[in-house]
Amino acid sequence: MKRRFLHFAACPIDHSDLELISWESRDVELSSVDLELAAECGVDPEEIKEEIISGVLLNRSRKIYYPIYNGVPRLLTFRTKVSEIFEEKFREKLREVCPEFSLPSEEPATGEADVLRSFSEEWVDYDWDGDTYWNLSAEDMFESMELMLDVKDRPFRNKQILEVGIGIGGIADHMTRSQRCELVGLDLSYAVDGAFTHFSRNPLMHIVQASAFAPPFKAETFDFVYSQGVIHHTYSTKTAFDNLSKLPKKDGRLYIWVYSPYDESRTLNRRVIMGMETVLRPVIWRLPTLLQNVCLLPLIPLYMVHQAAMVKTRADEKQVRYGPREALHAARDRFTPRYIHRHTDEEIMQWFEAAGYSDLQCASKRDLPEFVPESFRSCAGVDGFRSEI
């Protein structure tokens, strides 16, 4: 965690300011390019030249602390395995520095512990190599995301951005560099540890473990908030949306992309897979991780064969072939989440309008190049500007 993160952070319970106590840190070597970008974004180099590896963020009025562990601030309002490991590892330090403080012990949102488990298992062992991202090359994924976020007509250069659900962090890292912006990447799962391992050297990218139901920011903090394929995996997409819709500044922008019923019915193959999901997912999400993987093993060859067939079609010529790792990753994403909701463009647009957003556009109605995955275009992707607060 860089000290600059305090510019954005607030207690996720009462949104008060947090006090930093650092125990371990390392220097961050800033290149001339880094310094130039920091100057463009109005960031003091002194705030990003140090990476805090361990420490605490204190809410003194409530006498609670949030761990900074393995470089990542853990701003969840409920106890987790990692927060308890931190508590045990630094017990003496905590007694010395903040003896009257304790971890927050709020109840998580409905099913959130299950969501944390399933997506941690999906992303923790994801071996980022910078070459492929899901079923695309990393280059094509990044270009597709730039098109989905409409960076040409709705740029966010030199702005302060929040990505909700960063996964391994590759898209967040790319956006800070290509769009020359400062970005906070939030994720509920332990994917944040992989993101930190790969991208903590990016001085204008901040990584935080937190929940969309208790975001650790004050209202009206960011110029642009975006979330691609995340909040439909919560118990209530609408409640998650309502929380995120408060975070852009007035005239700030919000982009949300979630699954749609249309995407699952547009081809015979997708209808078959959707039927399998309907039968299998309610059983598989409840199983221990090892048994989940056992159940998914027979599906891995099917995913590999299906993807190889897709690669041969002209429309999908830029897609990459699945190996066993990629096939298991895709199968976990489909069959292990507790929640997968699907919504129409019209439904999401109503949410935007009710939250005071205008100048709305739908990704499905935009003219996008053929190489952008069909699923990107056929799901519900909406963005707009906050005109009322």
Image: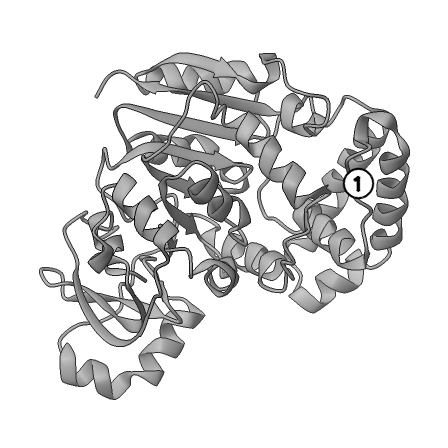
Residue 37, given in percent of the width and then of the height, sits at 34, 45
Residue 319, given in percent of the width and then of the height, sits at 77, 38
Q: Amino acid at mark 1?
A: Met
Q: Name which residue lies at 31% across and 57% down.
A: 77
In the image: residue 347, left or right of residue 92: right
Q: Quadrant of residue 273?
A: top right
Residue 218, given in percent of the width and then of the height, sits at 21, 41
- Depth check: give the residue in front, 333 or 109: 333
- Depth check: give the residue in front, 304 or 331: 304
Q: Is residue 164 shown to the viewer in this render? A: no
Residue 173, compared with residue 266, is above or below; it is: below
Q: Residues within 10 Å of mark 1 (few under 14, many from 20)?
A: few
Residue 130, given in percent of the width and then of the height, sits at 63, 54
Residue 355, compared with residue 291, is above or below; it is: above
Q: Name which residue lies at 61% across and 17% down.
A: 364
In the image: residue 312, left or right of residue 111: right
Residue underneath mark 1? 276
Q: Quadrant of residue 40?
A: top left
Q: Is residue 373 shown to the viewer in this render? A: yes
Quadrant location of the N terminus in the rendered image: bottom left
